[in-house]
Image: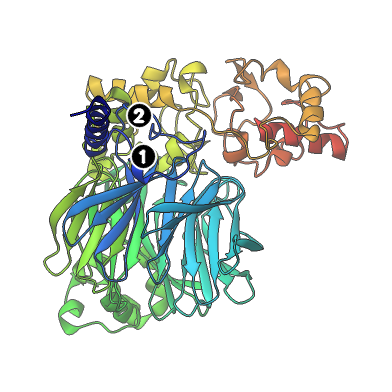
C-alpha cells in the first residue's frame, strides 16, 4: 500500500474511534461552530461528556434528533434500528429544537451561539445560522403561518421569524415576563403558550409566583398572562392539548412563606402540574405530582399523547417519568366521580374529589393535596432509564416515549402500553467521571435530600443562580427569610450567605446538604459539589455592547458608582464586595441586628429581587425607594439621568 493511502486509512481509523467513543463530534458531518461553543466539541482528542437535553421525533417515529449540550452537537438516532447514525456539530450550547412537518428541516436554538441553526436533515448540513438576540432557549414552528417562534433567556422576549423568507425575516418581537423557557403552539396556530421560568416581583409578597404568557397567534400580540399558585418557580416546560383547549405546565411550588422546620410531606417544596384553560385565559387547577412521603422533584418536560388523553412528565431530580391519565383528570375536575372512588374516605370526611363534586371552588385545595392523584388512579411513576431525565418526545402512535437522560448521556425508550423502559440508546461512550461532573450530578439529585422533595438546583436553577424566592432557614433563627443567592464565585467571596454564618465555601457546600437536605452526605459528595461550585463562571451581561464593553451610559454610571454615590466603598474589588458585614437600614423585626454581608454584584442583571429579603423588585428600587437614608450608596440627590446611568452600570456587571 502506498504511504499516502496508509496515512489516509490511519486518519480515518482515528476519526472513527473518536466518534464512536464520544470524544468529538464527527467533522465529516460538521456544520459551522464558533468561539462561544462549550463542552469541547471542537477540541479533537479531548474527552467530553454526553448530555442530551431536548429531543424531537420525525413524523413516522423512526428517527430522533437530540441536542447534546456538552458535546455541542445534534445527535441523530435510528429509533427503529436502535442505534446512533450520526451527528451535526454546532457548538454554542444547543438547547431546544423543532422539525418542519415534512421532516426535512431542523431548527436548533444555540444558547451561547446567539443563533438558531437551520439544518438539512437529509444531508445533515447546516444551511444557515439565524442571529437571535442573546441566548435563545426554545423554538417552535407554526407551519401554516410560516412562522418560527424563538424564546430568549436574557431579553425576556419571543422573536417571531417568517420561515418563507430566505434568509428568515424577523417579523415581530413580543414581550414575555422573565426567562421564557418553552414555547408551544396549538394545532390551529390560534394560541402560542410561553412558560416563564422564574417569578418577577418581590419575595416579600406571599403571592409571588411565575406566570404563563399566552400570545394571539394571529395578531402576534400578548393575549394574557396566567398566574400559577404562590411560590411557583422552575417552570421549565409546557405543552398544549391536540384540540387547542388546554395547556399543561409543570413546575415547582415553593412553600416559601413557612420556615423550614418540617421538611417531610411537602412543607418546603412540592411538584405540580397546572391545567390552563386557553379559551378563558385562566388556570383551572393545579395538582401535585408527589406522593405523601416522597417528592417528585424538578419536573423538566411535559408532553401529550396524540389523542390528548395522556401526559408524560420527566422528573430530573428523582430520575423518573410520570404518566398522567389526563382524560380521567378532566372528568374528575368536571365532577364526574366514579362510585368506587367516591366510597374512599379522607379520614372521616369525603375525599377531595367528592368535595369538589359538591363545590367546585374546592378545586383550589388540590394545590396542597399529596394524595388526590393517587387515590384517583390518575398517576403512575417509573424510573427514567438513566440519570437526570430532561427532554421527552412521543412517537406519532403514542406507543413510545423517548427520554433524554442528561447525566447518563443516553436516550431511553419507554414502552407506553407496558409502562416500562424497553432499552437505551447511548449518544457516545462517557469518559471517566470527574469531581466537577459528579458534583453537578449531586447538585441536581433530589435523591440526596430527605424524601426527595428538592435538589440544590430546585432553588439554584440555571447552574447555581436564583429561584427569585426568599427562604427561612434555621441558621440564623426563625421568621427572617433571606433571598436565594447566586452561587457564582462562591469560593472567592467568603463569609457566605446574608448573615455570614458560613465561613468557607466547603462549609457552605456541606451544610447545604446536611441542614438543607436533612441527610448526612459523604465527604466525597461534599468535595464534588464544591468542585462543581468552584467551576461556575459568570455569563456576560446582555447589557454590554456587542463587543463586550460598557455602554456610554454604563461608563458614566461606573464613574458615579466609584465617585459621587460612594458605592465602591463597600462594593470593591473584582467581585464588588469588601467581604464585611454592614447595617444598611434594611433590618427586619425578626433579625437580631441589621448587619448583613456585603453581596457581590456579579450577574446582577439576572438575580432579582434584591436586598437581603428580596424586598426590591428592580435595581432602580434598590437605589431609590429602598434606600431612603442613603445607607447603601448616596443616591438620594442623584438626578434621574444619573440614576439611569448608575443602573446601566450595575446591569452590566
Q: Nearer the viewer, residue 332 or 490?
A: 490
Name above or below for residue 128 compared with residue 515: below
Give the mark nearest the N terminus, 1 or 2: 1
Task: Assign the C terminus to one quadrant of the image.
Answer: top right
Q: Nearer the viewer, residue 308 or 98?
A: 98
Q: Residue 342 in the image: state x and y as whole percent.
A: 20, 79
Residue 44 circle label: 2
Q: Quadrant of residue 428?
A: top left
Residue 624 circle label: none
Q: Nearer the viewer, residue 388 or 299?
A: 388
Q: Is residue 616 left or right of residue 35?
A: right
Identify the residue at horizontal 86%, vertical 32% (top origin): 638
Q: Residue 96 in the image: state x and y as whole percent.
A: 43, 54
Q: Quadrant of residue 154?
A: top right
Secondary structure at numbered mark 2: loop
Name above or below for residue 143 compared with residue 209: below
Q: Quadrant of residue 160?
A: bottom right
Q: Residue 405 in the image: state x and y as whole percent.
A: 26, 47
Foreground mark, 1 or 2, reads: 1
Name above or below for residue 494 compared with residue 199: above
The 10 Å Cα crowd at callout 2, few under 14, some 14 to 19, many 20 or more, is some
Circles 1 and 2, Cβ within 8 Å, touching? The answer is yes
Residue 27 circle label: 1
The 10 Å Cα crowd at callout 1, few under 14, some 14 to 19, many 20 or more, is some
Amino acid at each position: 500500500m502506498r504511504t499516502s493511502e496508509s496515512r489516509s486509512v490511519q486518519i480515518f481509523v482515528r476519526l472513527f474511534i473518536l466518534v464512536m467513543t464520544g470524544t468529538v463530534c464527527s467533522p465529516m458531518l460538521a456544520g459551522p461552530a464558533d468561539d462561544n461553543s462549550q463542552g469541547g466539541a471542537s477540541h479533537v482528542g479531548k474527552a467530553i461528556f454526553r448530555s442530551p437535553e431536548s429531543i424531537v421525533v420525525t413524523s413516522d417515529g423512526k428517527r430522533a434528533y437530540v441536542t447534546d449540550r456538552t458535546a455541542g452537537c445534534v445527535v441523530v438516532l435510528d429509533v427503529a434500528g436502535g442505534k446512533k447514525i450520526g451527528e451535526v456539530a454546532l457548538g454554542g450550547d444547543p438547547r431546544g429544537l423543532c422539525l418542519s412537518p415534512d421532516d426535512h428541516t431542523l431548527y436548533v436554538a444555540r444558547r451561547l451561539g446567539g443563533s438558531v441553526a437551520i439544518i438539512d436533515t437529509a444531508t445533515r448540513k447546516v444551511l444557515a445560522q439565524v442571529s437571535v438576540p442573546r441566548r435563545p432557549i426554545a423554538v417552535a414552528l407554526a407551519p401554516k403561518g410560516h412562522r418560527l417562534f424563538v424564546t430568549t433567556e436574557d431579553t425576556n422576549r419571543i422573536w417571531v421569524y417568517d420561515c418563507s423568507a430566505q434568509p428568515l425575516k424577523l417579523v415581530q418581537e413580543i414581550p414575555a415576563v422573565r426567562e421564557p423557557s418553552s414555547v408551544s403552539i396549538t394545532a390551529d396556530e390560534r394560541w402560542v403558550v410561553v412558560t416563564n421560568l422564574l417569578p418577577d416581583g418581590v419575595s416579600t409578597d406571599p403571592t409571588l409566583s411565575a406566570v404563563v404568557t399566552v400570545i394571539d397567534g394571529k395578531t402576534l400580540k400578548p393575549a394574557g398572562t396566567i398566574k400559577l399558585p404562590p411560590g411557583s418557580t422552575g417552570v421549565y416546560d409546557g405543552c398544549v392539548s391536540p384540540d387547542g383547549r388546554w395547556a399543561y405546565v409543570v413546575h415547582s411550588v415553593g412553600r416559601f412563606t413557612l420556615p423550614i422546620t418540617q421538611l417531610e410531606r411537602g412543607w418546603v417544596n412540592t411538584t405540580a402540574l397546572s391545567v390552563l384553560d386557553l379559551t378563558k385565559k385562566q388556570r383551572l387547577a393545579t395538582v401535585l405530582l408527589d406522593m405523601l412521603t416522597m417528592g417528585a422533584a424538578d419536573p423538566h418536560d411535559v408532553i401529550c399523547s396524540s389523542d390528548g388523553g395522556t401526559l408524560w412528565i420527566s422528573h430530573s431530580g428523582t430520575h423518573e417519568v410520570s404518566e398522567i391519565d389526563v382524560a380521567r383528570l378532566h372528568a374528575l375536575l368536571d365532577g364526574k366521580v366514579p362510585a368506587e372512588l367516591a366510597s374512599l374516605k379522607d379520614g372521616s370526611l369525603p375525599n377531595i374529589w367528592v368535595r369538589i363534586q359538591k363545590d367546585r371552588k374546592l378545586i383550589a385545595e388540590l394545590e396542597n393535596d399529596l394524595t388526590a392523584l393517587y387515590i384517583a388512579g390518575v398517576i403512575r411513576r417509573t424510573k427514567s432509564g438513566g440519570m437526570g431525565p430532561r427532554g421527552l418526545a412521543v412517537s406519532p402512535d403514542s406507543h413510545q416515549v423517548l427520554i433524554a437522560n442528561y447525566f447518563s448521556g443516553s436516550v431511553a425508550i419507554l414502552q407506553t402500553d407496558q409502562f416500562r423502559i424497553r432499552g437505551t440508546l447511548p449518544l457516545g461512550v462517557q469518559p471517566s467521571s470527574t469531581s466537577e461532573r459528579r458534583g453537578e450530578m449531586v447538585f441536581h439529585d433530589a435523591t440526596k435530600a430527605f424524601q426527595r422533595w428538592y435538589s440544590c438546583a430546585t432553588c439554584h436553577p440555571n447552574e447555581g443562580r436564583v429561584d427569585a424566592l426568599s427562604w427561612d432557614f434555621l441558621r440564623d433563627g426563625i421568621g427572617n427569610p433571606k433571598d436565594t443567592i447566586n452561587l457564582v464565585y462562591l469560593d472567592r467571596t467568603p463569609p457566605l450567605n446574608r448573615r455570614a454564618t458560613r465561613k468557607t465555601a466547603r462549609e457552605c457546600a456541606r451544610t447545604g446538604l446536611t441542614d438543607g437536605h436533612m441527610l448526612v452526605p459523604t465527604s466525597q459528595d461534599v468535595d464534588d459539589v464544591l468542585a462543581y461550585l468552584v467551576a461556575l463562571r459568570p455569563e456576560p451581561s446582555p447589557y454590554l455592547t456587542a463587543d463586550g464593553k460598557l455602554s456610554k451610559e454604563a461608563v458614566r454610571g461606573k464613574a458615579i458608582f466609584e465617585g459621587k454615590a460612594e458605592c465602591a466603598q463597600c462594593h470593591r474589588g473584582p467581585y464588588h464586595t469588601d467581604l464585611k458585614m454592614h447595617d444598611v437600614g434594611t433590618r427586619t423585626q425578626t433579625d437580631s441586628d441589621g448587619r448583613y454581608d456585603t453581596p457581590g454584584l456579579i450577574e446582577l442583571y439576572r438575580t432579582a429581587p434584591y436586598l437581603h429579603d428580596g424586598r426590591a423588585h428592580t435595581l432602580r428600587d434598590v437605589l431609590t425607594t429602598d434606600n431612603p437614608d442613603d445607607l447603601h450608596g448616596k443616591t438620594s440627590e442623584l438626578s434621574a439621568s444619573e440614576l439611569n446611568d448608575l443602573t446601566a452600570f450595575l446591569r452590566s456587571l
